[in-house]
Image: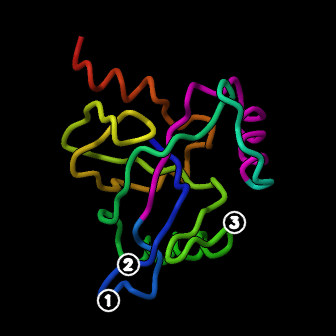
């Protein structure tokens, strides 16, 4: 489970909607909802994190897996929670948790997270899951190590 942090407009028939998303996980597990909210507040205030601070670390981009109605719902949330615009990309106030599926996970020196996933796709919006319960980099590293 991960947090939506960036969005970009789709292509073709979805060009008017934000459907291409970047997702993040926590650098470590938040102690509680208040600590996670402090990170969100810092993001909104555009305060850069210190190296040892809890933070959301982007690790994957996905643009498939949701229904048209779900894409429309998320598009409305993105427009309501946009923090900044960078050309076609919007940074979004972290509010939405998604379950992501992928074919594989591995180490990557090209990504800030140090992790790359293969063929990521959104499995569902986790309206039932609070932000502070999203997964961590450690969870992804455990997946890289495999079972056992």
The first of marks 3 and 2 along the sequence is: 2
The foreground one among 104 and 122 is: 104
50 up-or-down from 94: above or below: above
In the structure shown, which secondary structural element does the residue marked by tag 2 occupy?
loop
Q: Which quarter of the image is occupied by the C terminus? A: top left
The 10 Å Cα crowd at callout 1, few under 14, some 14 to 19, many 20 or more, is few
Residue occupied by mark 1 = 13
Q: Is residue 113 left or right of residue 75?
A: left
Q: In which quadrant of the rendered view does residue 109 lie?
A: top left
- Residue 68 location, x and y as percent? 37, 78
The 10 Å Cα crowd at callout 3, few under 14, some 14 to 19, many 20 or more, is some
83 up-or-down from 116: above or below: below
Disc 3 and disc 2: Cα gap in Å?
A: 19 Å
In the structure shown, which secondary structural element does the residue marked by tag 3 occupy?
strand
In this picture, which residue range is highlighted in magenta?
21-43
Disc 1 and disc 2: Cα gap in Å?
A: 8 Å
The disc at residue 83 is: 3
The foreground one among 109 and 21 is: 109
Residue at 30 percent of width and 26 percent of height: 143
Residue occupied by mark 2 = 10
In the structure shown, which secondary structural element does the residue marked by tag 1 occupy?
helix
- Residue 9 location, x and y as percent? 44, 78
23 is within the stretch colored magenta: yes
């Amino acid at each position: 489970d991960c947090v939506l942090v960036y969005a970009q407009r789709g292509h073709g028939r979805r060009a008017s909607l934000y459907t291409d998303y970047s997702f993040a996980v926590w650098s470590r597990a938040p102690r509680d909802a208040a600590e996670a909210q402090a990170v969100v507040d810092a993001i909104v205030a555009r305060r850069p994190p210190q190296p040892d601070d809890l933070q959301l670390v982007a690790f994957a981009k996905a643009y498939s897996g949701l229904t048209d109605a779900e894409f429309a719902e998320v598009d409305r949330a993105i427009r309501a929670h946009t923090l900044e615009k960078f050309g076609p990309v919007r940074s979004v106030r972290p509010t939405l948790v998604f379950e992501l599926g992928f074919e594989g996970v591995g180490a990557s020196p090209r990504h800030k997270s140090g992790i790359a996933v293969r063929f990521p796709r959104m499995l569902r919006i986790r309206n039932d899951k609070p932000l502070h319960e999203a997964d961590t980099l450690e969870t992804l590293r455990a997946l890289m190590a495999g079972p056992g």
